[in-house]
Image: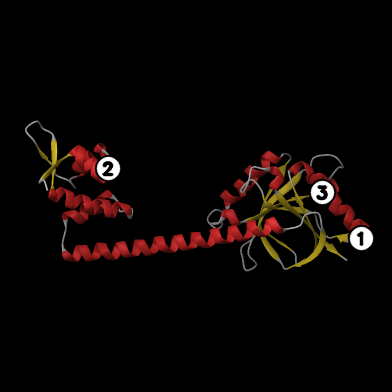
């Protein structure tokens, strides 16, 4: 084994750019010697320090933290840094486990949505559902994503798992016109039942529900189908219809794969 290595050899061995090695030298964490031709050469001591730098950088230690450690290297300092490494690793494990739960939940939801039979009217009971809302006039499909993102930005400190977040949009039934595009008046997130901080509640009770697949050019027609079904079956509307986007452009760009649920509260 050689005692000294050129900068190009170290760069290749560690997968570190030459510029990064020069930066480490500027910080004082590496102290390569110079050959007669002024080329940098790295000793086995430098390699030992590089091993430490690499390991700590993988755990997102700053270069200043690494320099402080290398400048005050001792058994006590090593124990301190190992405990910190242990804490950071556990923190990452916890985050990965949480991410794994989110992914499992998303897989479950998407798989369930594939099995849902569209085109059927059902009356289902729901508990109180707290919601976060953004009142905004939406006249085009393209505006919906912006509105939802705007609502998410307002509450991103609470909505960590946006991929699994249930979101919906509401329409005023008495303002709808046959064969005209739907104008939505708000978007909202449906939260867990135990949430205490919310903008409004979807009241508990009976809801007429209807699923349809495909693009949103059908929205007006499908909402009218729900309203007409309620009238034909002597069901009184107790609120405005709203759409829940079960499968949308979060999962697929293919409109035929979209799944949308329409709900409206009713009394029998």
Toward the viewer: 89 or 10?
Answer: 10
Mark 1 lies on residue:
233
The answer to whether residue 106 is left or right of residue 90 is right
Spatial distance from mark 3 to mark 1, Cα to Cα?
17 Å
Does residue 15 appear left or right of residue 117 in this picture? left
Question: What residue is rendered at 73% in x and 58% in y?
Answer: 116
- Residue on which disc 2 sits: 16
Mark 2 vs 3, N-terminal side: 2
Q: What percent of the width, then of the height, locates residue 173?
A: 83, 50
Does the rendering let one see residue 10?
Answer: yes
| Disc marking residue 222 | 3
Q: Which quarter shows the C terminus?
A: bottom right
Kindly report the distance in space between the C-alpha atoms of the residues bearing marks 2 and 3: 59 Å
Pointer 1 local density, CA inside 10 Å: few below 14, some 14–19, many at least 20: few
Identify the image quadrant of residue 128. bottom right
The picture quadrant where one finds residue 21 is: top left
């Amino acid at each position: 084994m050689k005692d000294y290595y050129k900068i190009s050899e170290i760069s290749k061995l560690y997968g570190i750019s030459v510029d990064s090695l020069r930066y480490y030298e500027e910080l004082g964490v590496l102290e390569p010697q110079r050959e007669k031709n002024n080329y940098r050469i790295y000793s086995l001591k430098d390699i030992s320090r590089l091993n430490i730098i690499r390991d700590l950088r993988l755990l997102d230690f700053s270069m200043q933290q690494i320099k402080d450690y290398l400048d005050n290297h001792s058994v006590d300092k090593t124990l301190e840094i190992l405990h910190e490494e242990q804490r950071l690793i556990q923190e990452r494990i916890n985050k990965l486990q949480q991410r794994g739960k989110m992914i499992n939940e998303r897989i479950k939801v998407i798989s369930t949505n594939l099995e849902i039979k569209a085109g059927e009217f059902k009356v289902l009971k729901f508990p109180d559902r707290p919601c976060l809302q953004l009142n905004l006039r939406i006249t085009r499909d393209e505006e919906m994503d912006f509105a939802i993102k705007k609502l998410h930005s307002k509450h991103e400190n609470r909505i960590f798992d946006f991929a699994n977040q249930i979101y919906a949009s509401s329409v005023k039934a008495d303002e709808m016109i046959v064969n005209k595009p739907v104008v939505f008046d708000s978007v909202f997130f449906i939260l867990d039942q135990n949430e205490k901080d919310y903008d409004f509640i979807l009241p508990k009770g009976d809801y007429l529900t209807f699923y349809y697949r495909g693009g949103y050019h059908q929205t007006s027609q499908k909402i009218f189908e729900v309203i007409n079904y309620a009238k034909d079956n002597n069901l009184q509307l107790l609120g405005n219809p709203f759409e829940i986007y079960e499968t949308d452009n979060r999962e697929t760009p293919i409109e035929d794969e979209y799944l949308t649920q329409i709900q409206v509260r009713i009394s029998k």
